[in-house]
Amino acid sequence: MGALPPLYAKWLSEIIPDEIKGEKHATCDNCAMCSGSNAEAKKTIGFYNPLTKCCTYLPELPNFLVGRILLDSDPAAAFGKQGVEARIEAKEAITPFGVGKTDKFTKQYKDNPKEFGQNLELRCPHYIEEGGLCGIWRNRNSVCMTWFCKNERGQVSREFWKVMHEFLNVLEIALTHWCVLQLDPGTDSLAYLFPLSYDSFFPPKSTLEPEVYQQAWGKWLGREKEFYIECAQLVEKLSWQQIAEAGGVKLEAYRRLLEAANQKRNTKTLPPALYKGRFNVVLQVETSVMVSGYSPLDPINMPVALHDTLDYFDGKAVEKTLEQIRQEKNLKLSEGLVQKLVDFGILAEKKPEKDTPYNSSFGEL
Ligand code: SF4
Ligand code: SF4
């Protein structure tokens, strides 16, 4: 998906000065996972339902993002706002930490991994059917911001987005907690909220008994929307320095990892020696072979002649391998092409173990 949410873009510009582009092959307006005319490929690759795309998901929204959504007066954001208001009014998984997942959704999602991208019942309530758009696009969470079905640099890009997700998730949790402390719902409420909050914002059960709900909200009970709006306003004013302080050492660790992952994503360096990687032949026709390496969602098509050179990559120096292919196959492989095969996991720096599992997951947020 494309542009970053404005709040997150502002923070990220403090630590990664170059523009962070989305993945251009994940063409969400004309979903890359819903198109494709090749019936055989469609059967093998597993396309998504055009009525859901990859949005078979119920996002957990940190308190300050909930507030931003409630404050958004743009008519184009009205559907998303109504959906979030409906979730708050239903009082399912609603705490000062934000708006969480219902138990019903969590169970259905976990029990049906093959229905990702398929089942209309799992579709996000913020998905706008007309045009297949996201109703909370400008304030979507770190999961929705960093998930792409296709990555321009294959596993290198995917690794970058995974680290970005971890970084933003740490940041979301830290700021969520910070907001709760700033707006102090009372000691009873804190006693209820904080033992829950090691890795997730949300209690293990989404439906709280009325007295537990009352305890969770403390002196903000009955003013839940007001609370979320205050959180948004508090967070809006924070400098990066203040955010870094709230995030502590964990956020700093992920900031460093993110910097390194960004540098890797922007650098192309071929390893000195390469092996044929662990990949799956998805489809073979007379002139081409479709293979998937790092992800079954992102296969690549190659001419049969190129596919036939892969066995030459047996750990020798890349230069020697390319020369051998040139002499014996009369094929000159460019460094750019070899880099792409590495990025997509078709060639590997290390010899794959015989039992290295092939990644066969068709997605999951
Ligand atoms: S990220 Fe989702 S909506 Fe975008 S192209 Fe991929 S499957 Fe489609
Ligand atoms: S919040 Fe938006 S991007 Fe995320 S699942 Fe819902 S509709 Fe899709």
Image (tube, grey):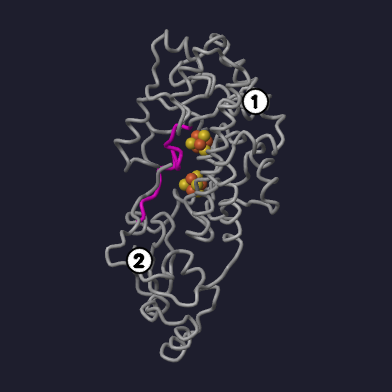
105 falls in the magenta region: no
Q: Which residues are magenta?
A: 45-59
Q: Quadrant of residue 219?
A: top right
State left or right for residue 186 relative to residue 57.
right
Give the amino acid type for the residue marked by disc 2 in the picture.
Answer: Arg
Q: Quadrant of residue 229?
A: top right
In this view, which residue lies farthest toward the left? 355
- The residue that disc 2 covers is 278
Query: At which x and y percent is residue 77?
Result: 62, 28
Magenta span includes 57: yes
Give the residue type that dot 1 points to.
Answer: Ala
Residue 352 percent location from the top left of the image: 34, 68
Which of the pair 196/5 is nearer the observer?
A: 196
Q: Is residue 17 left or right of residue 2?
A: right
- Mark 1 highlights which residue? 232
Up-down relation of residue 58 to residue 84 (above or below)? below
